[in-house]
Image (tube, rainbow, N blue to C red):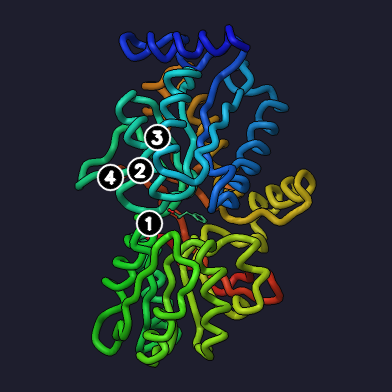
Amino acid sequence: MRNIHSLVLLCLAVSLTSAGCKKEGAANSNEILIGEYASMTGNTSAFGTSSDKGLQLAFEQINAAGGVLGKKIKVILADDRSDANEANTAVQKLINGDGVVAVIGEVASKRSLAGASVCEKYKVPMLSPASTNPAVTVDNGRTKPYVFRICFTDEFQGRINGRFAAEQGWKKIAMLTNVEEDYSKGLGSNFQKTYETGEHHIVANESYRNSDRDFKAQLRKIKDANPDAIYVPGYYTEVKLLLPQARELGLNVPFFGGDGWDSPETLALDAAQGQFYSDHYAAEDPRPEVQEFVNAYQAKYKETPDAMAVLGYDAARVMADAIKRAGKVDREAIRDALSKTKDFPGASGTITIDESHNARKPIVVLQIQDRKAKLFKTYPFE
Ligand code: PHE
């Protein structure tokens, strides 16, 4: 144990001054090392555990079918405990300590932004399964060369949320945004840009922070503004608390949000029944790619996969496909192959990576009914 410890320390020390201690991505010649950073614990642990389950299932299937380039994929998982600083440290450890050839992560945009800066610095390809904030892949108009995602962005999601609200006939919307999360702020402002035209008005714009547990002050102000519906572009961690509080205050208009609502904990709530949120896939979608995935996932984990699970699964498969197309275990070659991903038949939709390193994919709006997420409407990519 002590020896392993000093070896890792030595690697870390050496990698600060040279190209690195280990040959990138190869623990031995029969394995390809992929790093994964995820929130396995901490406040949004549902995100990390789900994306990891999807990812593990995909690599298990890929390895059972012979692996990639004749080698088995080995995943090294680093728990960032739902914290952006920890995400930064976790990715440094994966790159400099373990010598991974590529990195998969994160779900939450703030942590992907933290991990992306490390991957850019060390020129290691990173693939985010689920982070939708535009700045994850594009910094002030410049596409980050090593950072990719297999999901759509909040420019698209916010726009569709705005259109959905207008289609529902809602003329007055109240917003409630988490000012400490890039995801929430970005989605909120993109929504506002599309929705707030002509006869559509934002009648209240309230905010909260990650540590908040009581939302009644904001909800009272919202109630006074008498909105037709309430937009909460937040994570399930707060959504699950504020929905019941709204009911207690007699605030009975519809609530809706984005993919951050996705979690078994949201679906289980009484106060969530009938509400809407946009997401990356619907488990009931009859496409064979979806049903094969859902069946395999259910057989292994005895539960219905959520969006993070399907995106973890697809991220792993897109990464394996890129390594195969790269033809060698090499960071630059994998980066190039990722950028050329085209028409990949994902379970979350057909994946084509564009020049901004984002995936062009449709979005679904789901309605919570009988404690399940039911498909309400699909919007094609535009
Ligand atoms: N899109 C969210 C973010 O960028 C993360 C998320 C994805 C949450 C999918 C739930 C489901 O932060």
Residue 169 visible here: no
| Residue depth check, mark 4 versus mark 2: number of the one nearer the observer | 2
Kindly identify which residue carries mark 3: 88
- Tell me the kind of residue under disc 3: Asn
Real-space Cα separation, disc 1 to disc 2, in angstroms: 11 Å
| Residue depth check, mark 4 versus mark 3: number of the one nearer the observer | 3
Kindly identify which residue carries mark 4: 138
Real-space Cα separation, disc 3 to disc 1, in angstroms: 16 Å
Q: Which of 114 and 190 is in front in this view?
A: 114
**Cβ–Cβ below 8 Å for labels 1 and 4?**
no
Task: State which tag comes first along the sequence, 3 or 1.
Answer: 3
Kindly identify which residue carries mark 2: 113
Q: Nearer the viewer, residue 252 or 31?
A: 252
- Neighbours of disc 1 within 10 Å: few (<14), some (14-19), many (20+): some
Residue at screen point 62% across, 16% down: 70
Spot occupied by residue 96 in the image (x, y as percentages of width and height) = 42, 19
Spot occupied by residue 264 in the image (x, y as percentages of width and height) = 65, 61
Cβ of mark 1 under 8 Å from ligand 1: the answer is yes
Residue at screen point 55% across, 70% down: 241
**Cβ–Cβ below 8 Å for labels 4 and 2?**
no
Vertical order, 311 against 77 (above or below) = below
Dividing the image into 4 quarters, which one contains the C terminus? bottom left
Residue 120 visible here: yes
Asked whether, in this view, residue 299 is left or right of residue 92, the answer is right
| Residue depth check, mark 1 versus mark 2: number of the one nearer the observer | 1
Kindly identify which residue carries mark 1: 181
Real-space Cα separation, disc 2 to disc 3, in angstroms: 9 Å
Real-space Cα separation, disc 4 to disc 3, in angstroms: 18 Å
**Tag 4's secondary structure?**
strand
